[in-house]
Amino acid sequence: KMESELPRAADAWLAVVIFSKDRPCQLLCSLVSLLRHVRGVALDISVLYKASQPTFAESYFVVESLFQRRLYPSFAPVEWHWMEETDETSLGKLLDSMLARVREKTTTVLLTVDDALWFNDFNAAAAMQLLKSDNRIYSVHAKLCPRIEYAHPNDKFMRVPPFSHFSLHQSTDSKEEGEKISPDLLIFEREKGEYDWNYPWELSASLYRLESVEEVIQAIRSEFGSGAVDHPNHLEGYGVRLLKQQKLPSAKSSKYCACVTDPVVKVVTVNRVQSLFDNPVYSQSDGSEISVDELDQVLRYALLQAGLADGDAAADVLAQKLQGSDGWWKSYLKGVETLEL
């Protein structure tokens, strides 16, 4: 059993990297939930997004505007960085730029995706302190807890490893002993688990040391070429391959990972925006996916309703509150007045 002092939010910045493609509506929901439940640290959030068609680009513009205007509450300071992947600016270049920017601010990175929904509080300060204080720990998986026994991609039940507790004390300004916090992180030897429990490099909701992220990116480029990190699935898949081949020194020397005691985040995959892997998705009653185009229409309809008016009047209200002219908003909202949800 380990004990440590919990740093104050003002003393710790967590770099958050969220990958998104063609899912501005899901991104909005993910970010709102993240702001509400990732606690104990200040957040430096980099949204790395790609829009395959103009309608998605418009909605990413809207979502960015919503957060830049600080319309959603957070419990700590937040800095936003919206970084678009284009033909000229690859995902790898965006990652390099992000890592260079946060290097002097933090030593910890949370990698996550746009369909991750946070529903319980996650003590990010505890996770950062664990990575800082124990070199045996390679990563902290917010998506795992002892209740996770089934691997959806593999369609199999998993062997869950044994755990030990990591305990913290909340630091105070007084000389009195800090307030004891119930252990909220569990440590496990990853090779004693299987599937998700022995998958230490992943992008959906896990924290890593900044140097470990840099190591993975450099190793992938060295082994597979400079463009091998330009797709999130390659970034994850190649990283896992190198880790299993023991070509990542930090992972080779860090045999343990950590997770939370109770569930805090779930990746709700209702559509697929990549063709590299045939991962399972949650389908509708007729077996179909909820398309990204349908959800984009839902986002536009929700914004129309938020304008508290109909048609052109709603566009005028949104133009006053957010970025974009009333003419731009009229075009953006066109055709959604009769949408049936």
Image (cartoon, rainbow, N blue to C red):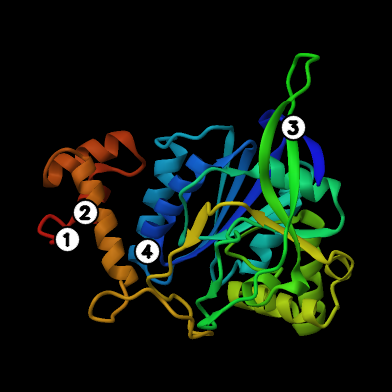
Q: Which residue is mark 2?
A: 301
Q: Which tag, 4 or 1, sits closer to the chain's start?
A: 4
Asked whether residue 311 appears in the rendered view, the answer is yes
**Nearer to us: label 4 or label 2:** 2
Residue 2 or 227: which is nearer the viewer? 2
Q: State the SS at label 2.
A: helix
- Going by the numbered disc 4, the residue's amino acid type is Phe
Per the image, the residue denoted by label 1 is 341
Question: Upstream in the sequence, badge 4 or badge 2?
Answer: 4
Q: Which residue is mark 3?
A: 169
Pointer 3 or 4: first along the chain = 4
Measure how far apart labels 3 and 2 are at the Cα level. Answer: 46 Å
- Please state which amino acid type lies under the numbered disc 3: His
Residue at which label 4 appears: 56
Q: Amino acid at mark 1?
A: Leu
Question: In whole angstroms, how far apart are the C-alphas of marks 4 and 1?
Answer: 20 Å
Camera-nearest residue between 22 and 173: 173
